[in-house]
Amino acid sequence: MGIRYVAFRVQYMVSSKFGFHKKKFPTHPNVKTFISLEDWRAKTPAFFFNGKDDIPVPVKKNDVLAARFRESKNGTFTFFSSKKYELGTQYDWITNPDTGYRYDSTKHWSEIQDLSTEAGDIKYVWEKARFSYLYDIIRHDYHNQEDQAGFVFSEIEDFIQHNPINLGPNYKCSQEISLRILNWTFALYYYRNSKALTPERFDALMNNIYWQLHHVYHNINFSRIAVRNNHAITETLMLYLSGLLFPFMPETKKWSKAGKKWFEQEVDYQIYKDGTFLQFSMNYHRVAVQLLTWGIRLSELHQDPFKDTVYDKAKKSLAFLEASQDPVSKQLPNYGSNDGALFFKLTNDDYRNYQSQLDDLRAVLFGTVREVSESQGWYGLQDLKVDNTRGEGMFSFRESGYYIIQEQDVKTFIKCGTYKDRPAQADNLHLDIWVNGINCLRDAGSYLYNTSKEELNFFMGTKGHNTVMINGENQMLKGSRFIWYHWIKEALATLSEKSEAYLFEGHINAFKHLGGYTHKRQVKKTKNQLTWEVVDHVGLKNGDSMEQFWHLDSKMEEFIDITAVDAHGKVVTAIKDTAWYSSYYGVKIPSLQLSFKDQTGTLKTTINIKRFQ
């Protein structure tokens, strides 16, 4: 990670241990008053809209949103877009509903442990506290014409009451703070003219937003040095937008200027030249896409555009994600870390459907969409042209190492790349196959970030991917939590087209903790047929063995035939086992795993898929 990273982490730990953070991030600070509600309403800074009557979205009764609202009203919330938890109407905001552990809200945030076996995954506390659930309530209000301003502001008030500034778990993460401010702001503008927005509520909200912004600004180096991923993009964007949305707060001029510069730097650094993303995760790349949509749209509404590099990286991100997207299901491979993040949900589409978020950015950049959805209207975007042409053939993104073959409704996705930034999973030479919207051969997913060592090793490790292990070991050495050692630094691949087939050839130098091995993989995709020939070769030493894994959708077993022979042409018997698949964070279901063991150093595997409806 480099000397700068290590030095900062040491200094940060010392500051926490000796209480320096308590002085820097005060508790029970002085109450700030900036602008009256009347004056704010008279000269509200530009936003996507200026109230519920200023949204270019057709009103349409929506029973799904009505049902979701009833659940929220009764204290039932959907976590990570998948699993429901009954929090009750008196939820305290600091209890983990998965473990029942209650954090101490009298402790300074710097004293809160975010990794604890007893407490469980702290994300279960953060999930409701980021307030992304407000979008369903606001959309219910809009489409079903049921004013919920009182309920929304009572939820915000309740949070403020139970989470004093800089105390407890909900001040531990500056990204969560930033998202909370953005989501409160969306609600504030929607209910701009509501009687439920009283001067007292407005003043309390502005005071709380100020001190949360203060926290983000004074803790920004943690995300920019120690984390350097979507956290930094979120937080620097929030600081930039603070000056646009809250110009009446004196410090926001300084915070905004710095935030804009840092945001531009983070986008330029984190999104590679070919449009791929340093976190090697489709879902975290979507997080960046949503933040870019907010940032670019609001910067242009305020006549304050970013440097050209932001637009360039946004366009290249869009190109990469659209090339990776399955054109039938609108999903992307379940590739890389997937923590369920979908910050600004403005449609009823399933979480795994990326279409509206990609189209929102496309609308901001080009004024076009692949498919019209209501989400563009919430950004104040109208009169968009539909351009649903999608590319086919070969796509190579060499900087991160993604190779894609698209033939109508058939997608072949292969990963083969090196790491100059922190890898998330040991998944090189993984092969994903999609047919008619079904992910036939798939990535096992992520499941949880704070779980057993065995589960972390499966989901983050090589075994959870369609590739090869040697002597039962991962391609890289697993460290604690998100850490991998012996990053893969040598990998080469080519993707070419022949008269009857597409041909991928790649190799990695990996398994350094075992002394080092080269894994070569060739994938031949026969054109217009559901046939793939895969050859894996590893220069095994005496006594070594390799094992090739395939993860299948169990419902597709009767349609998929996978056979293998070794270097001598001898048939290798498939080992059929039950593994796990996690499409949503915190949820795992049994899945079919096939594997082939070999000691000759070569496996020739044939995959045939029967066409299905």
Image (spheres, helix red, strand yellow):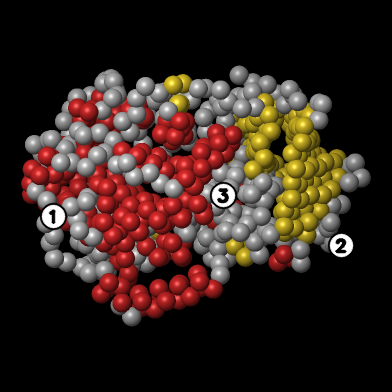
Identify the residue shown where x is 45% and y is 72%.
9
What residue is disc 2 on? Answer: 542
Amino acid carrying mark 3 in the image? Tyr
Which of the 4 image quarters holds residue 61? top left
Residue 73 x, y percent position in the rendering: 21, 38
Q: Mark 2 and mark 1 in contact? Answer it, CB < 8 Å.
A: no
Q: State whether residue 327 is above or below residue 120.
A: above
**First in sequence: mark 2 vs mark 3:** 3
Identify the residue shown where x is 29% and y is 20%.
58
What residue is disc 1 on? Answer: 34
* Element at label 2: loop
Amino acid carrying mark 1 in the image? Phe
Residue 533 x, y percent position in the rendering: 79, 35
Badge 1, how many Cα within 10 Å: few under 14, some, many 20+? some
Identify the residue shown where x is 69% and y is 33%.
394
What residue is disc 3 on? Answer: 272
Badge 2, how many Cα within 10 Å: few under 14, some, many 20+? few
Depth-wise, is mark 2 or mark 1 nearer the camera?
A: 1
Q: Residue furthest bottom?
A: 18
What whole-number distance in Å separates the C-alpha atoms at marks 2 and 3?
A: 41 Å
Q: Quadrant of the C terminus?
A: top right
Residue 62 x, y percent position in the rendering: 29, 23
Q: Is 470 or 232 nearer to us in this picture?
A: 232
Which of the 4 image quarters holds residue 89? top left
Q: Is residue 528 visible?
A: yes
